[in-house]
Image (spheres, rainbow, N blue to C red):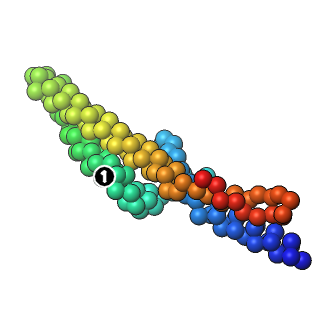
Amino acid sequence: MKNLKQLLCLFILSVCAANLSAQEITVFPGMWGDKFYQDKEPLTWKEIDVIMKENQVCALHWQKSKKNMIGALIAGTANFGSAIWLLSNLDDNEPLTGPLIATAGTGIISSIFFHSAMKNKKMAILEYNDSLGKKTSLFLAPTSNENGIGLALKF
């Protein structure tokens, strides 16, 4: 009976310890943007935002990513407008120099902002994943020997 109680306590402790450990975040590109997963469970943007705010370095990269993405969207919208301007001048046989420069310039600016946003998002997720392993330098591991079954503190 005593061994059964020990085994039951060991099982409950191992289940609780397994649930307390944080999982890494994985990102996959989707049709409408990135899809975030944590241990096969999909995460929403709100959940990712809360997770990233837990770590100061992650939060810094995450905020930079969001600001750069807003800049990319603004420049992309300007690029769309200048492309329409270019096409309308092309149809009316008007000079194309101004619209062509505007289209190329806004496209380059949008690409720079987008690349920076993706880089900062990647850095935030990598920083979060790196911080998971640094929380503790010890853990409990189930063990057994001639004295019975128990938990060992491993460094």
Disc 1: which residue: 60
Q: How many numbered markers are drawn?
A: 1
Q: Amino acid at mark 1?
A: Leu
Query: Is residue 12 depicted above or below 96 in this figure?
Result: below
Question: What SS does tag 1 mark?
Answer: helix
Estimate the x, y position of residue 17 in percent, counting from the top left: 64, 64
Estimate the x, y position of residue 8 in percent, counting from the top left: 79, 71
Quarter of the rendering occupied by the N terminus: bottom right
**Does residue 145 appear in this view?**
yes
Q: Is 15 left or right of 37, judged from the image as shown?
A: right
What residue do we see at 42% from left, 47% from top?
127
Residue at the bottom extreme, as displayed: 1
What residue do we see at 18% from left, 30% from top?
105
Estimate the x, y position of residue 71 in percent, counting from the top left: 23, 45
Q: Is 116 left or right of 35, judged from the image as shown?
A: left
**Does residue 83 appear in this view?**
no
| Disc 1 packing (10 Å; few <14; some 14–19; many ≥20) | some
Residue at the front extreme, as displayed: 147
As rendered, which of 135 and 115 lies closer to the eye? 135
Q: Is 99 left or right of 133, judged from the image as shown?
A: left
What residue do we see at 41% from left, 42% from top?
122
Estimate the x, y position of residue 149 in percent, counting from the top left: 81, 63
